[in-house]
Image (tube, grey):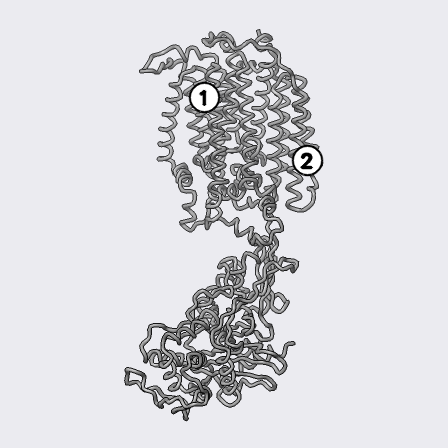
Amino acid sequence: MSKAGITVATADPPPPAVRRLPRRRGIELALIVLAVLLSVYGYCAVGLARHGTLPPGAAGYGAGLGVLALLAHLAVRLRAPYADPLLLPIGVLLNGLGLVLIYRLDLETPGDRAAPAQLVWSTLGVALFILVVLLLRDHRVLQRYTYVCVVAALVLLTLPILFPAVNGARIWIRIAGFSIQPGEFAKVLLAVFFAAYLAANRSALAYTGRRIWKLQLPTGRVLGPIVAVWLVSVGVLILERDLGTSLLFFGLFVVLLYVATGRTGWIAVGLLLAALGAVAVGRLEPHVHSRIETWLHPFASIEAGEGANQLAQSLFAFAEGGLLGAGLGLGHSYLIGFAVKSDFILATAGEELGLAGISAVFLLYGLLVERGFRAGLAQREPFGRLLAVGLASLVALQVFVIAGGVTGLIPLTGMAMPFLAQGGSSVVTNWAIVALLVRVSDSARSGHDGQDAR
Amino acid sequence: MTRHIRHAGWFCVLLLVALLLNAARVQVVQAPSYDRNPGNRRPDITRYEQPRGDILVGGRPVTGSRDTREHLRYERTYTDGPLYAPVTGFASQLYGTTLLEGTEDGVLSGADPMLAPFPLWNDFTRARNAGGDVVTTLHPAAQEAAFKGLAGRKGAVAALEPSTGRILALVSAPSYDPQPLSGNGSAAARAWARLTADKDRPMLNRAVRQTYPPGSTFKVVTAAAALDTGVVRDLEAPTDSPDPYRLPGTRTRLTNASKGCADASLREAFTLSCNTVFAKLGVEVGVPDMTATAHALGFGNGELRIPFPVVRSTFDTTLDKAQLALSSIGQYNTRATPLQMAMVAAAVANGGQVRDPYLVERTTRPGGATLATAGSRAVRQAMYPSTAVRLRAMMRDVVERGGGHKAAIRGAKVGGKTGTAQHGLGNSGTPYAWFVSWAQGERDPAARVAVAVVVEDAEARRGDISGGGDAAPVARAVMEAVLKSP
């Protein structure tokens, strides 16, 4: 299978000749320092707002985050010197901001301290980042593990069915006091699988099979496995009531299929299937139906005299923030309810940082995604291109689905905001995504991609 | 492939733009309507995050704030709650605010933009100003005297400084303690249920929100109109009035409670409180001039704010002669608040000049620096000064020789007028006892206080109820309290 990735006949004009780009590691270091300083500033601002003094852990927090970021930077300097210099600083800043918000929310819930655990998970995430950058010399190695990836992803996805549901969704497994969301890890594995499979089979997908009206259908033998994998994963997620992630996988599948085959028809088919699926699930699944009702009428529960639901509270929080926000630590996040550190952490950001702050956060994600796409564009071989585009799309879709949900743009689906939200699996996964993007961008920008491997 | 990656990238840009636009919609465009949503607790939380400013009486706060450490953090407290409730009203986290707590809420809660030293800077920092204080015109001793004087009977007292219109006392009985309503717990809800279900209506501010038939105290108005229009030129001349007086156009005969009213002079009729004489005088003055005098004194004004609104006192302007006769002795559709009748007494004491009453002397910043001064209102000449002089003399007669003798104060000039107002179906209700008066100390250049007292149902046999017996001692106590203070 590993040979397939290299022997693809491409119909595109060859990508522009690659020249070595400047390394710009100094800029990366400066941006990392800035990101750490910003996070420490936020941490101090919370302490000052809440207690009138600098929080006792400020120095330790800053040192911890700084050391993690510097180690990651060293790893990049050592093994991926041509990597895009924006990727790591964005990850550090988002993770630091997330830690500040979680620390701030811990103050509202005296019984539940999540920030220390999140710091441990962040450390694990950065460690994974360093490991990937150090050990994975060439991303194309991953192509060898296409089927390992898909089997692992499906196993991870099915595991939670054996464990009890939490808040109506079976997406956690609990081992020795730790709860892990395996679906998060499955995201990356599936992205690798989709990229590798499509890279290997994209000509077959695009040019074989029957033509129905304007759509060239590939043969079942080529399309079959990937559709099967996709159907199984979405099916499992529906069983687990993790609709956000099933939407994410669907989006990832359609985007990669479109990019790999260049057939607009796939988008039409994708939208059609999505619409059918949405109607079917909305009709059949009461859980989803109620979420759609809430989205359409967020204040109906107030009019019914039952008080504000979580979406209404989230909207109130955003409204309270206005243009400039109430200031870190000065909002009333406890009103939002139990998911304030995970699904609804963006509402606190909106309340305390205002439209200005939340726009900055969105633009940070936008920049991360853009750098991912840019790595894909600069990359010459299809697997790397599809991998970068897939990972960047994962981030983009996830941010859109969760942010759109809590701001009332689309129906709410419980998902973790990348890097910001409390959740170990999520933080670790997102560091893995950034690590893979760093790796792809390094190979693209160093100007010798495809040379070593051959 | 490059082209399609770019397409996918543009799709992500589209998602980003949608997120940004939607965030702007929620946080800027829709924010005001979300803030007003009844399910949104944030405005309340911000509001109660800091202690409320205080209401001051005689330089001393009669309110306070208590830190409950709850989400709605500060609760209102009251010292002497029942005594000042008709002035302060209540400030409740559940039921809102009333009276001064309501009309001055902006200053007390700190929301008033005047409190900000630099308003634009505040918009930027979103700091809420500390609450300011409200300094009232109340005279603490007079207020206490009035409260004690009513001593649990149903009624009300209003006292004014005639030359300025400052309200010195405003009491309504039975009263209530606003304290239990402050919070948002079940105790507040229980207190609310108890107070609103009470048939004595303790939360009704009888001094300004309730009108009564003014009865004989209205004869002051009729006498002023008669003198101003020249219907009566000589106080001592006989008025050519029969006893009993047949109401024009009817067979109803109007009688008097006292003897000697037939053909009495205005001075005698005022002292004896002759219904027949004043009914006839009212008819002779006519509707337009009676209305003019009554309105100049404040009747018919539904706009009066002190700063909370005072209900309209009425003198009906569409009357036949029989109705006019009854209206002129404070019956039929004539109704007045106790505050309105205090304004009538104050006008007489102040040379015929009326100033609209007010309760807030000034508002201050938390440190005590003046924020705004209410000051006296415009002057209105309600009757000729000469008429006021003659009325003063007649009112003094009532206290010195007539039914108002219980209001007399040694060493002071006191004028008054009693009233006993019939009400209910066929006058079956326990009559209201009225007394309106003013007092001028020995060394005072002018009258210092004007009072109106109404007692709804004194605990006495019906025959004994009279303004002179029940209401005059209350008025006397209030006047004495004011005169005693330097």
How dense is the environment of label 1, judged by Cα within 10 Å: few (below 14), some, or many (20 and up)? many
On the question of residue B155 being in view, the answer is no
Give the SS element for disc 2: helix
The answer to whether mark 1 and mark 2 are in CB contact below 8 A is no
Q: Earlier in the sequence, mark 1 or mark 2?
A: 2
Residue B21, how many percent across, how many down? 48, 34
Q: Quadrant of the C terminus of chain B?
A: bottom right
Query: Does residue B149 sit above or below A6 in this rendering?
Result: below
Residue that numbered label 1 is attached to = A255
Whether marks 1 and 2 lie on the same chain: yes
User: How far across and down, in percent of the image, does residue B231 sit?
Assistant: 40, 82
Q: Amino acid at mark 1?
A: Val
Q: Nearer the viewer, residue B184 or A377?
A: A377
Residue under label 2, please give it. Answer: A61
Q: Which mark is residue A78?
A: none
Q: Quadrant of residue B239?
A: bottom left
